[in-house]
Image: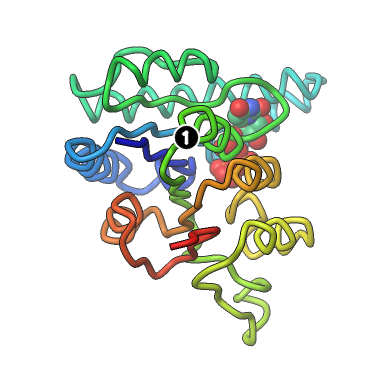
Amino acid sequence: MAHIVVSLGGSVLIPDDRDNHFLIRVAELIRRSAKDRPLIVVCGGGKVSRYYIGIAKELGASRDEQDQMGIDVTRLNAKLLQLAIGEDCFPGIPTSIDEAEAAASRSRIVVMGGTAPGHTTDAVSAMIAERLKAERIVNATSVEAAYSADPKKHADAARYSSLTHQQLLDLVNKGHHSAGPSDVFDKLGAEVAMRSNVPIYIVDGRNMQELEAAVRGEKVKGTVVGNSQ
Ligand code: UTP
């Protein structure tokens, strides 16, 4: 059975509000879902990574060094999720797409963070999805769906229930800051998903029903990108 890749935003995973409660619930969902289909969960860095990157920048760190700080935090977040999942989870944190592929051949649940400087964990999700010919990517994020503009600023902003990969790329390129373009999906990730034709479900990652529906490929309130069914 093909893999599902979940890009779990850092601000979703560690919102700074009853974090252990969310981690326990999402770990349950992951364990349950992995009975039907193998999962790779790529954890983001959230505001903790921005905090470290900000300080590193002030200390004169290079762009690569800043990114490395961010990657370290994504791996710390991955470690927390791994703890919450327990023994059903692959025990290590893969640090590259090759390592993730090897881990995926040994375990039905693999949790990881970033890989290399210069991109985000959305891009990592798309790269691993491409490598494993995954069934879909679930972007568990802090927005409910993709919009034509920031719905907080534009009352007439259109909410998309479906988009083609090209339409997603156009949105990301236009730089619509609905909550920051990276909250919808990052540009490199959108490009990789388009070239490998992997659907992306963009859903509110704090909403367990939505997240589960997206993992199962069922109808969601969020946005489905590039689903030809
Ligand atoms: P995130 O994937 O969380 O980035 O990685 P983001 O999209 O900016 O954060 P959210 O979605 O708003 O929470 C955090 C940072 O870690 C570095 C980048 O600097 C990124 O901004 N990173 C992450 C990498 O350089 N490479 C990776 O593979 C992953």
Residue named by callout 1: 133
User: Can I make out residue 227 in this image?
Assistant: yes
Q: How many marks?
A: 1
Residue drawn at x 53%, y 20% is 97
Q: Picture coordinates of residue 45 (x, y %)?
A: 53, 34
- Residue 160: percent from left, percent from top: 55, 73
Q: Residue at x 60, y 71 (%)?
A: 147
Q: Amino acid at mark 1?
A: Lys
- Residue 168 falls in image quadrant: bottom right
- Left or right: where 193 falls relative to 84: right
Q: Is residue 33 left or right of residue 100?
A: left
- Could you tell me residue 111's position as x and y percent? 38, 26
10 Å crowding of disc 1: few (<14), some (14-19), many (20+): some
Q: Position of residue 9 (x, y in %)?
A: 48, 44
When the figure is inspected, residue 49 is found, relative to residue 180, above or below; the finding is: above
**What residue appears at the point 63 percent right and 22 percent down from the top-left corner?**
69
Residue 157 position by quadrant: bottom right
Viewer-proximal residue among 156 and 130: 130
Label 1, secondary structure: give it. Answer: loop
Compared with 108, 214 (above or below) is below
